[in-house]
Image: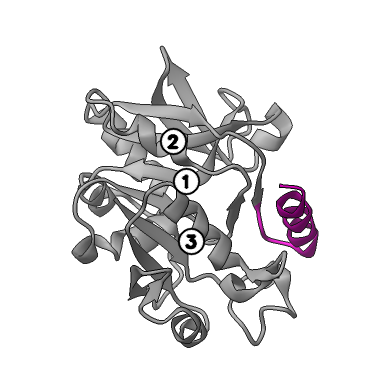
Amino acid sequence: MQGVVPAAGEGTRLRPMTEQRPKGLVPVNGQPLLTHVFETLLEAGVDELVVVVGHLADQIIEYYGDGFREVPITYVHQREQRGLGHAVSLTEPHVSGPFVVLNGDNVFVDGIEHVLERMSEPDVDAVLAVESLDREQARDTGVLEVSAGRVTGIVEKPEKPPSTLVTTGCYVLPEAIFDALALAQPSDRGEYELSEAVGLLVSAGSVVEPVEIAGPRVNVNTEEDLERAGRLLEER
């Protein structure tokens, strides 16, 4: 299975660390952030990486070259920051069959193997790795609407969250997601949301299942996030 890693962002909340280097090369527990993301994907069985680069892309390309631990890397350039959905859509020429998306600033301490395994079930079209937060925290992210163990919708940053299950930046998706992305409309922020495209799959009858992650996860955006991710990885 291929792994798509969006890593084009500027990492503005990590400045000044990201003024002269991309966010993906900021060290966490002695290794670049992207190295932890790549390792998580390889441990889950991914055998090819498609990395979306943008801000200071040349540094990432120079650091990793054409492969990571004998797994080939294809680089896709996102010239304008137009959202996660846009970043994923750019990888269409390089992706074949079901694939996993793992955001390039996400540290999953206990892996995602069980998430990818669920995709092998014959009745499942897509899988979302999720975690449970309290409703106040859920207001700041994508919240799932779930019925009978299946995703029926995703609401971005709702005032009244319909559940406490939220997206984590890890998705296992079919190729049909590219058709859905082509139909998606920009959000109020002018960005194309991957969650809207997943919602379109659901509306079209696709079976999308939520799978809770096995352990802690850190979405690295601030220096405090870096420190927390480093502590968790060291404890592991």
Question: Magenta stretch: dominant SS?
Answer: helix
SS for callout 3: helix
- Disc 3 marks a residue whose amino acid type is Phe
- Identify which residue is drawn at 67% across, 40% down: 216
Residue 55 shown left or right of residue 192 in the figure:
right
Q: Earlier in the sequence, mark 1 or mark 3?
A: 3
Q: Residues within 10 Å of mark 1 (few under 14, many from 20)?
A: many
Q: Position of residue 140 (x, y in %)?
A: 65, 42
* Vertical order, 94 against 144 (above or below): below
Is 182 displayed left or right of 106 in the figure? left
How far apart, in angstroms, are the residues tagged by discs 3 and 2?
16 Å
Query: Of the residues tagged 1 and 3, which is closer to the observer?
Result: 3
Q: Amino acid at mark 2?
A: Val
Query: Which sits in the foreground, 78 or 217?
Result: 217
Mark 1 element type? strand
Q: Residue at x 43, y 46 (%)?
A: 44
Residue receiving disc 2? 115
What residue sits right under mark 1 in the picture? 170
Disc 3 designates what residue?
A: 38
Marks 1 and 2 in Cβ contact (< 8 Å): yes
Give the percent coordinates (x, y) of residue 182.
Answer: 24, 54
